[in-house]
Amino acid sequence: MPTQDHSPSKIGDETHKSGKQGSGSPITARGEATRRRILDAAEEVFGEYGYYEASISEITRRAGVAQGTFYIYFRTKREIFAELVEDIGKRLRASMRSATRSIADRTEVERYGFKTFFEFVATHRRIYSVLQEAERVAPEAAHAYYDGLARGYTHRLNEAMDAGTIRSVDAEAIAYALMGIGHFVALRWLVWSQQDDTRPDDMPPLPDSVMDSVLDFIMSGLK
Amino acid sequence: MPTQDHSPSKIGDETHKSGKQGSGSPITARGEATRRRILDAAEEVFGEYGYYEASISEITRRAGVAQGTFYIYFRTKREIFAELVEDIGKRLRASMRSATRSIADRTEVERYGFKTFFEFVATHRRIYSVLQEAERVAPEAAHAYYDGLARGYTHRLNEAMDAGTIRSVDAEAIAYALMGIGHFVALRWLVWSQQDDTRPDDMPPLPDSVMDSVLDFIMSGLK
């Protein structure tokens, strides 16, 4: 479904992709797989080198494609970085949605939402740290990333207010407050302490006392 | 008092400054004033250009000093950036301490602490946005900055727990949660919305409904 990637926050024109849109032919699927492979390689390379020191040639080398192939999908390093930020935001939101979809209890929704978020950061911690560069490199992508998360959260908070399970608040303010909590707790316990570790799978989980205190604080704050 | 700036998080050796330490002579005071002028210029230049595009020559031009003078105080662009992060952290903590020092009521402490923080960000919003680059450029300075804020907060939360004005929590977890709230609310309402505005004094304040909801959420969370 390549057309799903064409959000208004996308940089540059779309002409070089229009041949692939909405056809569903094998070429589209193959093209989409190549694009995916380049994005995955870009996540690795940006994660290891940071935005400024990452190079397109290293991305194509890791993706196993010719340098010219890169330019079929992306025009610049900045463009693939902005698309990567958008892509990560989408995957994070999808994970959190699917983790909490069938849960009715409000505390459990928050627990599984935060748990999924922390797991996502733990498995993408290098790139999560690089995401902070997005604010200067591609501010529109950074804002769209946070705005997308905030909108989902605001919507859920408004629903909970309507259902009377939380009290009346400025939902957007609390959405950003909750995102800030997740972000800083993740940085402190999952990203910073691990920055010299090269084994992403060896990630220690968030201490239980931290998770419990944070959830308890949030639930009391909302009740 | 130049010796106060010599924290363990400092980068590089200190030999080129040792001539000024602990003397209190007019040369020390003059040297300190020059160092301050260079740091203030660096805040402007990093704020406008970001870390990577800022240059030492632009910093010395704005500070009105010869390029050679820069190297009496700092060895590299990275070093002055790390010291600027440390300096901003100190000034922020000092503002927050002095704003809340004589207040006993817990809600009022939080209110004035957050108010002071938001005012600080509003008047330093360009550099606040650049601070996020510190995590990649000078991670030890970024961690010391957040760690310094967190330690002050953790100390105050522990005191409040001892006094029985808040309930028992993992103080460090809640310290990071509160910092995250401040950070994201500041980004959303004070930094992002103003990024194209060149008049820092024209900053709209945080909407009352945001401040009230956030404080209400925090106080209910802690009680």
Image (cartoon, coloured by chain):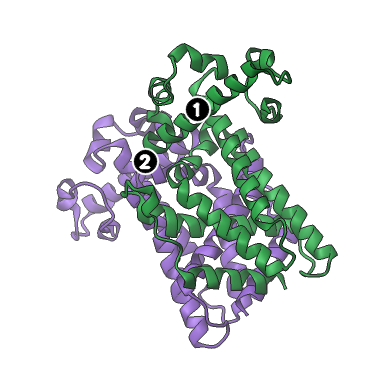
Chain colours: A purple, B green
Residue shown at 58% from the left, 19% from the top: B31
Residue A37 falls in which quadrant of the image?
top left
Q: Is residue A214 visible?
A: yes
Q: Residues within 10 Å of mark 2 (few under 14, many from 20)?
A: some
Vertical comparison of A165 with B88: above or below: below
Residue A32 position within the rendered picture, expressed as x and y whole percent measured from the top left: 29, 50
Q: Which residue is mark 1?
A: B37
User: Residue shown at 61%/55% (left/top)?
Assistant: B179
Quarter of the image with the C terminus of chain A is: bottom right
Image point (23%, 37%), residue name: A71
Q: Is residue B47 left or right of residue B75?
A: left
Residue position for label 2: A137
Left or right for A145, reference A113:
left
At mark 2, the secondary structure is helix
Give the mark toward the camera: 2 or 1. Answer: 1
Observer-nearest residue: A27 or A61? A61
Q: Nearer the viewer, residue A10 or A43?
A: A10
- Could one spot residue A202 in this view of the protein? no
Q: Residue at x 53, y 26 (%)?
A: B80
Tell me if residue B65 comes above or below residue A58 in the rendering: above
Q: Quadrant of the N terminus of chain A?
A: bottom left
The amino acid on which the numbered mark 1 sits, given as a three-letter code, is Arg
Chain ID at mark 2: A
